Image (tube, grey):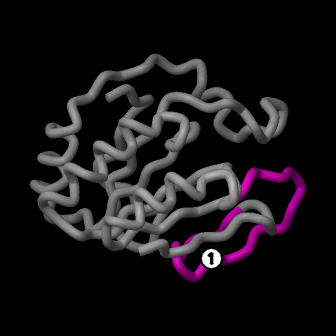
Amino acid sequence: MKTKGLISEDFVNYKKPAMTIIFPFCTFKCGTEYCQNSLLAHEAIIELNISDIVKRYMNNPITEAMVMQGLEPFDSWEDLYNLIKELREYTEDDVVIYTGYNKDELLAKIKKLSQFKNIIIKYGRYIPNQTSHYDENLGVHLASYNQYSERIS
């Protein structure tokens, strides 16, 4: 699968220690002038094997969740879905997906992902100059008032 990188042990993006996958594509629906990830778009794409990612996750005694973020995970839908599908063959640990899409833009994909247990999605585009707020599900502060997370399964 195509990525911009992988963080083996991430303690920033979720309340549990997580492996974070950085996805490589985005339509920049928030606007490139506001994007906090716009520099990431210029980084090289790294090919990683899904089975190798899952094996690496399962062999790490520290991680308790997998976070999907980066540019836009849903803009790499097949890789996102296939990674979660293979991960679920081994564990029901939390999977957190950070997206700039609004919930109503993802209904069909949410329905498909809801077959898997313990999926949490953070919705909402970044809006600059907002006060951050604490999200209970994620255990982190989100940058814009319109952003929120929801456990879909």
Residue 118 counted in the magenta span: no
Amino acid type at circle 1 is Asp
User: Left or right of 61: which side holds 28?
Assistant: right
Quadrant of the drawing holding the N terminus? top left
In front of the other: 50 or 111 = 111
Tag 1 residue: 135
Q: Quadrant of residue 140?
A: bottom right
Report x, y in % for residue 123. 64, 60
> SS of the residue at dot 1?
strand
Label the magenta part by its dominant secondary structure.
loop
Q: Look at 84% across and 67% down and name the residue there.
A: 131
Q: Look at 52% across and 73% down and name the residue there.
A: 138
Residue 135 counted in the magenta span: yes
Boundaries of the magenta span: 124-142
User: Left or right of 32: which side holds 109?
Assistant: left
Report x, y in % for residue 147. 72, 64
Report x, y in % for residue 81. 36, 46
Q: Look at 46% across and 17% down and name the residue there.
A: 44
- Total numbered badges shown on the rendered structure: 1
In front of the other: 131 or 107 = 107
Q: Look at 60% across and 51% down and name the residue there.
A: 99
